[in-house]
């Protein structure tokens, strides 16, 4: 077994880390305070060609795999950028995957080069108020009108919609209750314009990741052309599945990156902070939680790299991807929590930054899939236990 990164992969992480660390803690503190999109950061990554890392070379990208993408996103998070920095780059890697695999050549030519150059961001419109983890309950309806499709419905937790020109949209094209072989048949994936005449965007105030918006979308009469269907009509959910394992792997890397930088700051503080005549890091009550956090992060990271390797080799990786997400979400949050505790009262202060990392990494115990749903997958698919939902 070879656990080493290739020189090219190690160089990707070095270059990304150097670019990301050019944006200091004060930059991210200000973006968080103002809930302001990190335009300068995203532009720097676009100019350096990183947004096209996983897009095939034929469409202006680098044609690299999920392993390289997770190295990039982990390095961004480990720089201190957190989710506010990682999310805009994440959206250049994750939503395009169904288009790469299932889109027509015309759709690929129109969309992928624009994403690779940083001129187009895709929002992701799947979750609905009445259909969270149960995608079969989606109510947003796309109806043929002779010239294409007209869509009406609602989406929620649509990230980055205010900064995106288009969205990857999952909508029902077979009415609910209609005869279907499987309950997830009859859903279709579209690349849709975020037309302000037909899409109202309502921002959701939230705990963390303030620099990247999350939104509810009210869709009323949105027109979509036939050429903007991704893959087969009625097979959209299954096309989307190709991107779900990679997303679990990517967010696992991001959670590890946040945990690592939180741990780095906490360890530095524990070496320097003197209380009762000794550095607080000399006390096992401080040192042991940090050491345990490091061990858990390393374990989660190895599982993440294994899942990424399996995906890039074209091998099944559902169990490994879900396990990586579960382990990394817990390890990242526990590291940030231990870091905040190490700072004591100052951990609660924004000027020391760990409270932002704590708020942001907490998201990964909920999204893109909850810990409980990922464990349901492992219980059923790996352990052979009865399905619980």
Image (spheres, rainbow, N blue to C red):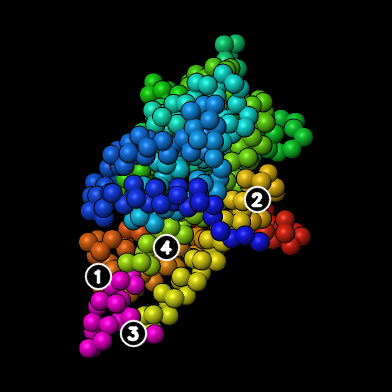
Per the image, label 1 sits on a secondary structure element best described as: helix
What residue does disc 3 label? 282
Q: Earlier in the sequence, mark 4 or mark 1?
A: 4
Labelled pair 1, 3 in contact (Cβ < 8 Å): no
Q: Residues within 10 Å of mark 1 (few under 14, many from 20)?
A: some
Q: Quadrant of residue 350?
A: bottom left
Seen as rendered, the residue at the extreme bottom is: 277
74 lies above or below 227: below
* Mark number displayed over residue 346: 1
Which residue was labeled with disc 2?
A: 310
In the rendered image, residue 52 lying in the magenta stretch gets the answer no
N-terminal of the pair, mark 3 or mark 2, is 3
Q: Secondary structure at mark 2?
A: helix
Question: Callout 3: 10 Å neighbours few (<14), some, many (20+)?
Answer: few
For marks 4 and 2, give the CA distance: 24 Å
Tell me which numbered mark, 1 or 3, is placed earlier along the sequence: 3
Bin the neighbour count of mark 2 within 10 Å (Cα to Cα): few under 14, some 14-19, many 20 and up: some
Q: Is residue 259 visible?
A: yes
Marked residue nearer the N-terminal end (2 or 1): 2
From the viewer's perspective, is the residue at label 4 or at label 2 nearer? Answer: 2
Q: Earlier in the sequence, mark 4 or mark 3?
A: 4
Q: Quadrant of the N terminus?
A: bottom right
- Residue where numbered disc 4 is placed: 259
Front disc: 4 or 3: 3
Provide residue 87's location: percent of width, then percent of height: 41, 45
First to last magenta residue range = 266-284
Q: CA distance from mark 4 to mark 3?
A: 21 Å
Q: Find residue 9 and report its horizontal and vertical position in percent.
A: 50, 49
């Amino acid at each position: 077994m070879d656990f080493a990164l290739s020189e090219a992969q190690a160089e990707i992480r070095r270059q990304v880390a150097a670019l990301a660390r050019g944006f200091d803690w004060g930059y991210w503190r200000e973006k968080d305070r103002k809930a302001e999109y990190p335009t300068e950061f995203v532009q720097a990554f676009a100019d350096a060609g990183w947004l096209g890392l996983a897009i095939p070379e034929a469409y202006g990208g680098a044609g690299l795999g999920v392993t390289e993408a997770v190295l990039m996103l982990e390095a961004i998070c480990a720089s201190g950028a957190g989710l506010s920095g990682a999310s805009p780059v994440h959206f250049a890697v994750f939503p395009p995957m169904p288009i790469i695999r299932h889109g027509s050549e015309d759709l690929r030519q129109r969309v992928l080069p624009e994403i690779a150059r940083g001129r187009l961001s895709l929002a992701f419109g799947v979750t609905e108020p009445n259909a969270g983890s149960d995608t079969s309950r989606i109510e947003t309806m796309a109806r043929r009108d002779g010239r294409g499709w007209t869509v009406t419905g609602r989406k929620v937790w649509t990230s980055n919609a205010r900064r995106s020109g288009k969205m990857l949209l999952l909508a029902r094209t077979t009415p609910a209750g209609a005869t279907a072989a499987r309950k997830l048949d009859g859903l279709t994936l579209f690349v849709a314009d975020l037309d302000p005449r037909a899409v109202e965007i309502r921002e959701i105030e939230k705990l963390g990741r303030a620099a990247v918006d999350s939104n509810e979308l009210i869709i009323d009469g949105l027109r979509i052309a036939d050429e903007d269907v991704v893959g087969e009509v009625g097979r959209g959910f299954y096309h989307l599945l190709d991107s779900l394992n990679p997303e679990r792997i990517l967010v696992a890397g991001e959670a590890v990156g946040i945990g690592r930088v939180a741990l780095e700051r906490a360890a530095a503080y524990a070496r320097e902070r003197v209380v009762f005549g000794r550095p607080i890091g000399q006390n096992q009550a401080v040192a042991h939680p940090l050491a345990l956090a490091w061990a858990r992060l390393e374990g989660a990271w190895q599982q993440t790299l294994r899942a990424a390797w399996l995906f890039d080799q074209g091998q099944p990786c559902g169990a490994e991807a879900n396990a990586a997400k579960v382990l990394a979400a817990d390890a990242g949050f526990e590291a940030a929590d231990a870091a905040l505790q190490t700072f004591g009262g100052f951990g609660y202060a924004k000027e020391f930054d760990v409270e932002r990392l704590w708020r942001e990494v907490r998201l990964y115990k909920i999204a893109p899939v909850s810990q409980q749903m990922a464990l349901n997958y492992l219980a059923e698919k790996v352990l052979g236990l009865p399905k619980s939902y």
